[in-house]
Image: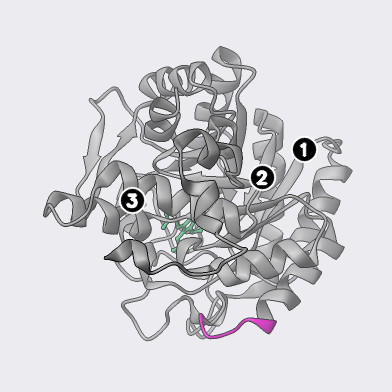
Amino acid sequence: MADHFKLDLTQRPRRLRRTASLRSMVEETVLRPQDFIAPLFVVDGKGAPEPIRSMPGVMRFNIIDLVKECRALAKLGVPAVALFPKLDAKFKDEVGRAALHEDALILRAVRAVKKAVPQMTVITDIALDPYTTHGHDGVLSADGLDVANDHTVAILCQMAVLHARAGVDLVAPSDMMDGRIGEIRRALDAAGFTGTGILAYAVKFNSAYYGPFRDAVGSAKAAGTKLLNKATYQLNPANRREALVELRLDEAEGADIVMVKPAGLYLDIIREVRDATHKPVAAYQISGEYAQIHAAAQLGWLDLARCRHESLLAIKRAGADLILTYFAKDMALALR
Ligand code: PBG
């Protein structure tokens, strides 16, 4: 009976979906291990890897285990890691002094990784949140009601130079202070680090999905829970044009790579940024995006491997050249 019903169609897009071979021939977006940057957390001491409750499968590593992880990632074809320190609370203060310590955990971690796995591109976050008792990305203003922009930028410049001296390939300011890309560029150049690049968190939204990361670095206590949240520096999730303003500024100030963060909820922004710049575009699939997929998979509601792949495919299809994701290693393994 169905055979009597023939449409007179010239175009039948399903023709190219008929076989696996045809489907692969017309596939537009392909994920590769080189697309990924693995964010890794590092802690002091010699302890066993510490799991993070809200990020299944993600660990805080001591420096020795961190180096091992970097070696494994390099072997799998993941070209870069973004390192985040988790400090003991006793090393934190109001102004994040530990960030400028010559022997800071992050600097030791960078040196160890660059020494053992020199081909690995090492990226470090430039922001004060792992170092401040209040968990903000900068120092507070005199009245304690806001983050002081220019004072913070001055500290971030010193921090960037220390990181460059330790051997990072790219510094990644994630703080959203005004003017910090230009100042950091000048500071790096003045100190002789003209070859150290800047991966700018150009478009970073004030997202509720950073929660698990703040557990991981122990900055959750105050940030986002007091009257003073990160809304005075991170972008309002409602704003699209403002994202392009931030992009223009960071580009003009000397960013080598521009980043959009979060990724999956901001695919429209990734696309606009891709269309508006000729610089490489990075996107950060953040902790909450990762946690969501794991949580649904744990409940048996979603298929972990397929959702992981699809979530990253969507980010690349939207226009991201590089993706920071906690799935980096799993993806590189799955793509073998
Ligand atoms: C802070 C920073 C954050 C992340 C990276 N650097 C969180 C924040 O702004 O509080 C988030 C990463 C993630 O959620 O995976 N400088």
Chain-order first, disc 1 or disc 3 = 1
Main structural element of the magenta stretch: helix, strand or loop? loop
Compared to residue 150, the image places residue 291 above or below, namely above
Chain-order first, disc 2 or disc 1 = 2
Check disc 3 and report its element: helix, strand or loop: helix
Tell me the crowding category of disc 1: few under 14, some 14 to 19, or many 20 or more residues within 10 angstroms, Cα based.
many
Q: State how far apart marks 3 and 2 are (Cα).
A: 31 Å
Viewer-proximal residue, 336 or 279? 336
Q: Name the outermost residue toward the left.
A: 299
Viewer-proximal residue, 249 or 318? 318
Which amino acid is tagged 1?
Thr
Reading the image, the residue beneath label 1 is 196
Judged left or right of residue 253, residue 219 is: left
Check disc 1 and report its element: helix, strand or loop: loop
Chain-order first, disc 3 or disc 2 = 2
Judged left or right of residue 99, residue 259 is: right
Q: Name the outermost residue toward the top.
A: 116
Reading the image, the residue beneath label 2 is 171
